[in-house]
């Protein structure tokens, strides 16, 4: 079995989906969380000057999406063929678009502009993306966002839902049920109790 080391900031952020994959697959990995001077020292050694970084037997892989896909395909949390993987990737891209919009809200310092972003989030962004995800889940008899079993797309949706206001999914029953299904997976439930606390 290869040795795995995942390095990221001390938050869930862009590394949490990979952590969820590891936990669901019951694969040991080193969960390294750094910031400040440690990040400054580590940055020049990363492939792209960013995190997360996955090391597999010492070989580095950068890019959160690439890391997630690699792990999901390796540990049975992706599709069963290339086209299914492409469809899952398209869902991941849509979830990433929502995450990007949420990131703008998190990084905006001007209170007036932030208030505008909050209003847009409530009236446009959240209804648009939640509507897409609600439809995908509702049309799938399994209750997962794609196919007949949990995939890393469910983990990606679960993770980004943790960045929005509590109760945001209350008007979207399929999303809410999907989140509950993720939370009750035994390995994930255990991780949610053990993982370090962070704002996002």
Image (cartoon, helix red, strand yellow):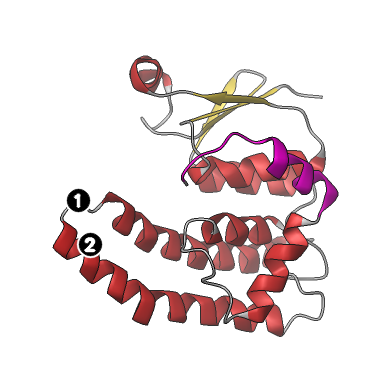
Which residue is at the far front? 167
> In the picture provided, is 164 more to the left or to the right than 76?
left
Front in this rendered view, residue 162 or 96: 162
The residue drawn where x is 48% and y is 31% is 10
Helix, strand or loop for the magenta stretch, by majority: helix
Q: Are marks 1 and 2 in contact (CB under 8 Å)?
A: yes
Q: What residue lies at 54% left-to-right and 56% top-to-bottom?
A: 162
Is 193 part of what is drawn in magenta? yes
- Per the image, label 1 sits on a secondary structure element best described as loop
Q: How many marks?
A: 2
Q: Is residue 10 magenta?
A: no
Rendered view: 142 above or below 60? below
Give the number of the disc on residue 77. Answer: none
Quickly name the residue at label 1: 109
Q: Report whether residue 145 is seen.
A: no
Q: Earlier in the sequence, mark 1 or mark 2?
A: 1
* Residue 151 visible from this viewpoint: yes
Name the spot of residue 24 as percent of width and height, x first: 78, 45
Quarter of the image where the N terminus is located: top right
Is label 2 in a helix, a strand or a loop? Answer: helix
- Give, as a single range, the part of the protein colored magenta: 185-199
Give the numbered dot on residue 114. 2
Residue 32 in percent (x, y) is at 56, 23
On screen, residue 28 versus residue 196, left or right, reads right
Give the residue drawn at x 60%, y 80%. 172
Q: In the rendering, at what x and y percent does residue 94 appear?
A: 49, 68
Reply above or below: 136 against 114.
Answer: below
């Amino acid at each position: 079995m290869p040795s795995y080391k995942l390095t990221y900031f001390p938050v869930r952020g862009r590394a949490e989906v990979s952590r969820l994959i590891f936990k669901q697959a019951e694969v040991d990995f080193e969960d390294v969380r750094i910031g400040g001077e440690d990040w400054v020292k580590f940055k020049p050694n990363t492939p792209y000057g960013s995190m997360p970084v996955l090391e597999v037997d010492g070989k580095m892989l950068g890019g959160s999406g690439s890391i997630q896909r690699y792990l999901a395909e390796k540990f049975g949390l992706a599709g069963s063929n290339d086209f299914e993987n492409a469809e899952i990737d398209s869902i991941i891209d849509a979830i990433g678009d929502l995450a990007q919009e949420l990131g703008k809200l998190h990084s905006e310092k001007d209170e007036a502009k932030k208030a505008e972003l909050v209003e847009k989030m409530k009236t446009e962004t959240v209804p648009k993306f939640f509507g897409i995800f609600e439809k995908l889940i509702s049309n799938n008899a399994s209750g997962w966002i794609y196919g007949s079993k949990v995939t890393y797309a469910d983990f990606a949706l679960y993770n980004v839902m943790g960045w929005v206001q509590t109760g945001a999914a209350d008007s979207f029953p399929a999303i809410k049920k999907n989140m509950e299904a993720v939370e009750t997976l035994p390995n994930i439930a255990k991780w949610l109790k053990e993982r370090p606390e962070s704002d996002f």
